[in-house]
């Protein structure tokens, strides 16, 4: 990665031990992209208009755009892809308690050709870090963000340790942590706390 990893530490919910999370750890879950950043000032007027169009859109509005946008022209394909990327961020990568997408999500849609190469791990990490700082400052016991990523990191590190050579421990971690293995581990965690 092109940036220095940042530590994300903390006690979240009932978990007493959350391993130190580095931005590159999240890449082990999601993939291994490189760092790309799109600053608002670099956007063309057309891109700024698109940014304004999506700013503050609700999850329901994004769902409607995904369902109703025909993919018959290049412009409609872009609208559909923008809506889909923002929807995935809202419900999976950067969830929060508001119905609207976060302002940090919108700039990610302007490089559609490199969507797969975008540093989504750093994007998720920075959002989690921001939410954790906010929670500590306001003394909250919960945070917004991709808690799914935190859960997988916690489960993976406690299951395999730091430097396991077990083939199941190798990236991408989503290959190991299927719905079935997650349910089993959540059940084990519940039994341990009772």
Image (tube, rainbow, N blue to C red):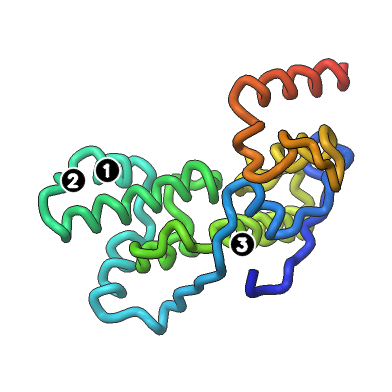
Residue 66 has which mark?
Answer: 1
Q: Is residue 169 left or right of residue 146?
A: right
Number of disc labels: 3
User: Which residue is at the far bottom?
Assistant: 41
Which label's residue is closer to the chain start, 3 or 2? 2
Q: Secondary structure at mark 2?
A: loop
Placement of the N terminus among the 4 image quadrants: bottom right
Residue occupying image coordinates x 67% and y 74%: 3
Asked whether disc 1 touches disc 2, contact meaning CB atoms under 8 Å apart, the reply is: yes
Residue 34 is situated, as x and y percent measured from the top left of the image, at 56, 66
User: Residue 133, relative to residue 147: is it above or below?
Assistant: below
Task: Indicate which label's residue lies in the foreground, 3 or 2.
Answer: 3
Label 3 crowd bin: few (<14), some (14–19), many (20+), radius 10 Å: many
Residue 122 has which mark?
Answer: 3
Q: Is residue 28 left or right of residue 98?
A: right
The quadrant in which residue 168 appears is top right
Instruction: Measure the C-alpha gap from mark 1 to mark 2.
Output: 6 Å
């Amino acid at each position: 990665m092109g940036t220095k990893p940042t530590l994300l530490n903390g006690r979240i919910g009932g978990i007493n031990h959350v391993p130190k999370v580095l931005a590159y750890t999240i890449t082990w879950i999601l993939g291994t992209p490189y760092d790309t950043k799109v600053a608002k000032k670099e956007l063309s007027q057309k891109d700024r208009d698109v940014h304004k169009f999506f700013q503050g859109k609700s999850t329901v509005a994004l769902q409607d755009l995904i369902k109703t946008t025909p993919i018959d022209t290049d412009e409609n394909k872009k609208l559909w892809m923008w809506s889909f990327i923002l929807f995935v961020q809202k419900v999976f990568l950067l969830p929060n308690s508001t119905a609207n997408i976060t302002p940090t999500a919108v700039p990610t849609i302007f490089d559609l050709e490199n969507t797969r190469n975008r540093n989504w791990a750093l994007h998720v990490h920075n959002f989690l870090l921001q939410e954790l700082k906010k929670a500590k400052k306001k003394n909250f016991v919960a945070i917004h963000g991709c808690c799914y990523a935190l859960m997988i990191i916690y489960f993976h590190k406690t299951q395999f340790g730091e430097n396991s050579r077990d083939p199941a421990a190798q990236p991408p971690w989503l290959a190991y942590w299927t719905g079935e293995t997650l349910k089993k581990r959540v059940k084990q965690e519940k039994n341990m706390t009772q």
